[in-house]
Structure formats: C-alpha cells, structure tokens
Amino acid sequence: MKWIEKQIWIVACSFSLPVAAQTVHVDSDRVAYQNTITVANTSQVELFFRAQKAIADYVTQQPAQIKTDAINNEISAQGTIKLQSPYHLVKSLRYTIKLSVHDGEYQYRIDSVYLQETERGGSTKLASSEQLLKGMDVSGAASWIMEKQLNEIDMNLQKVIALVKSEMKDQGNKM
C-alpha cells in the first residue's frame, strides 16, 4: 500500500514541477523583460539594421506596425502570439517590444503584455499582465490555471527574446 501512495505522490509532484518553475519577469506589478546585450565589434548602424530584421522576422510581418526612430536608434513594434486554447476560444498574447541600439550593444524591453480571449462568434476579453498576476493571489484551481497561463506566456516571450538575440549576434558566427 505504501508503494502505491508513494507512486501517486511522485506523479502529483511531477505535475506541479512546471508550476514551481514559474519564471515570468515582473516589473512594477506587471510582466516585463529587459536586458542589455553586448555584441563586440559591431557598429550602431549594423545593429540597427539587425534590429529591423529581427522585428520584421520574429515579431510582426506588417511593416506598418514597426515604428522606427533613427534619431534615438530605437525600433519598436506590437507583437502577437497565438496561445493554446480550447476550440471555443482563441487566445492571443499581445506585447510591445522595443530595441535600442548603440555601438557594440543593444537593449531590449518587452512590456505592455496582455492576454486577449475571443469566443468564437462572441465577445472579446482583454486581461492586462497586472490582472493576470493578481489572479495568482487567489487560491485553489483558479490560481493553478493562472500560473499555468503565465508559464505559457513566459515560454513564448523567452522564445521571442532568444530569436532576437540570435538575429542580433555576430553574423559571422551565425549558421
């Protein structure tokens, strides 16, 4: 009997591991990611072109949504990622990304994160990252569901960051 209880406990713990691994980044009670990355021996002009390509390739393919500020060497855009959802819902992650470039380095910032849920043939609900994080304050199944949603959001934003970093790194080392 003890062996069965132990196996059940192990299975239950394995389901909670993704929840315990929650890594969503929070800044002023909202989801935000930022960092400065060094790219040795790369000019500001080269990094600016790489940033334009990264935004166009990995954030939005709609040039009208890309805002370029050549004076301040900044590029920003609104990104959208479809999330897993049951058939009756369409869930999308919306966010803003901004890249600022300088000689040998660039900064990225992802913020204005919110979740858009649209019922097929019905209404649309928006939940800001602040609201999503407040959902973690409740207990029980609602908190677990919200934490699972935040983990999925984090995973998708980390993927965007990795793709942008890949595009911005030294092109000579890229394969």
Image (spheres, grey):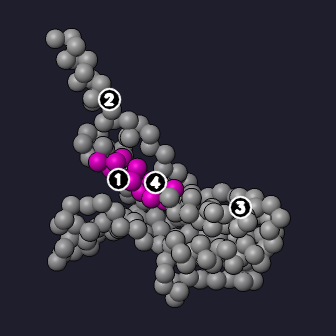
Of callouts 1 and 4, which one flags the residue occurring earlier in the amino acid sequence?
Answer: 1
Disc 1 target residue: 149
Foreground of the two, 22 or 141: 22
Q: How far across and down, in percent of the image, does residue 158 sit?
A: 51, 56
Name the disc covering residue 74, or none. Answer: none
Residue 148: in magenta span: yes
Can residue 109 be seen? no
Q: Which contiguous range is marked in magenta?
A: 145-158
Of callouts 1 and 2, which one flags the residue occurring earlier in the amino acid sequence?
Answer: 2
Residue 143: in magenta span: no
Relative to residue 34, is residue 102 drawn left or right?
Answer: right
Q: Regarding mark 3 in the picture, which secondary structure is present there? A: helix
Query: How crowded is the residue under tag 3: few (<14 C-alpha within 10 Å), some, or many (20+)?
Result: few
Of callouts 3 and 1, which one flags the residue occurring earlier in the amino acid sequence?
Answer: 1
Disc 3 target residue: 173
Disc 2 target residue: 13
State the quadrant of the N terminus. Answer: top left
